[in-house]
Image (spheres, helix red, strand yellow):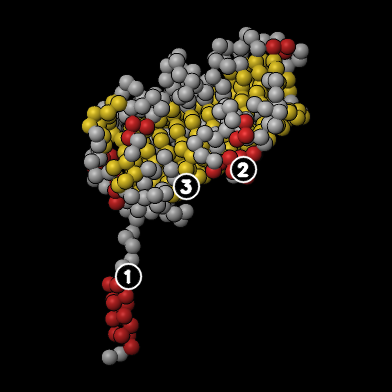
Amino acid sequence: MSMIYRILILLVLFSLCFPLPAAPGTYEVGVGKTFANIGDVPWENLKAGDQVLIYWRPQSYQEKWVIAVRGTELQPFVVRGVPGQSGELPIIDGRDATTRSQINFWNEDRGVVKIGGANTPAVDLPTWIVLENLEIRSGRPPYQFTGRSGLTSYGSNAATIYVGNGQNITIRNCILHDSGNGLFVASASRNILVEGCWIYDNGIESSIYAHNTCTEAIGMVYQFNYLGPLRANCLGNNLKDRSAGTVVRYNWIESGNRQLDLVDAEDSMDPVNHPSYRKTLVYGNILIEPDGAGNSQITHYGGDSGDTSIYRKGTLYFYNNIVVSTRTGNTTLLRLSTNEETCDCRNNIVYVTAPGNRLALLDSSGIMHLNNNWLKTG
């Protein structure tokens, strides 16, 4: 037997014993596509490099599901909406939504689209996931959905996207509205990027516990987003964050009880014990305070649990922001929770339509370093 034949036989035997992984697949959902509905996709069997393309159609997709896949940096798992001819994003509607029976995940009532926290697929830590180009809405009371327990009501803390756990998650160019929380990220999450999204019209009437965003992670970045007013008569904050390594840059943030509520970790000591917990970056944003929009404070930094031992007790770097308040009464730029919180405040424009003596730069506690800011006279 020649050497060439021997090599060929060895290659065949090797491939039988060690089969190569299947090539990444593309799953197309929509009118005239392979899958008519999102729930037809085999979510329990997806892998790194796969992509699910959800095409726009005139009617919304009234479906909800969990994403639990271990992607890689080179082969992320991607769920991407394909816009219509006029740029319309596919709509995922939580009202009367159905759930694929082959998947099984807990806290179904906490979100329309969930990342992580599933029995099937049995993936402990989803990684390298991209979710983009989707309008997701209507995860809140009194809306209901059909899940593994039949007809179920959403919780008041439900979100359009609920990240139960995950690492290296990107949420990009999505519209998140008409839910309790627009976005919720739980404390087991790492390296979450939210960019180019429109997040508005969320909250629960008369409640201070539901917000446009409510996040607690290690490594939390918001950039290039529009965060608009909450739903009418809702008392939550606009961007509420309890993370370590928080970066808020180049966003338009308008209204809410406070525009920014950057407080202590609530569910885990992991963020508190992380070195980046003591350094928070807020720069290049436009912060708008309408008249009568809740608290007069634009930004709160430190903590709100009452356990001051776990407050951030570091430095808020507040640079190159534009703050505009049309309040007829007082406007307070910043509240620091204790004297152990510090703000390095420089190169900002802070403008109020009321007389200059109605602007306070700091509440009663903390240390603020001011440099090169433009403030209204008086």
Query: Secondary structure under badge 1?
Result: loop
Quadrant position of the C terminus in the picture: top right
Seen from the viewer's position, the closer of residues 352 and 317 is: 317
User: Quarter of the image holding residue 32?
Assistant: top left
**Image location (x, y in percent) of residue 22:** 31, 60
Task: Quickly name the residue at label 3.
Answer: 167
What amino acid is found at the position of numbered circle 3 in the picture?
Gln
**Image location (x, y in percent) of residue 191:** 52, 44
Name the residue: 33% across, 39% down. 106
Seen from the viewer's position, the closer of residues 224 and 367 is: 367
Distance between the Cα atoms at labels 2 and 1? 43 Å
Query: Which residue appears farthest toward the bottom when viewing the image?
Result: 1
Name the residue: 56% across, 22% down. 258
**Image location (x, y in percent) of residue 300:** 61, 25
Task: Quickly name the residue at label 2.
Answer: 276
What amino acid is found at the position of numbered circle 1 in the picture?
Phe
Q: Nearer the viewer, mark 2 or mark 1?
A: 2
**Image location (x, y in percent) of residue 61:** 29, 32
Task: Quickly name the residue at label 1.
Answer: 18
Query: Secondary structure under badge 3?
Result: strand
Distance between the Cα atoms at labels 3 and 2? 17 Å
Q: Is residue 66 visible?
A: yes
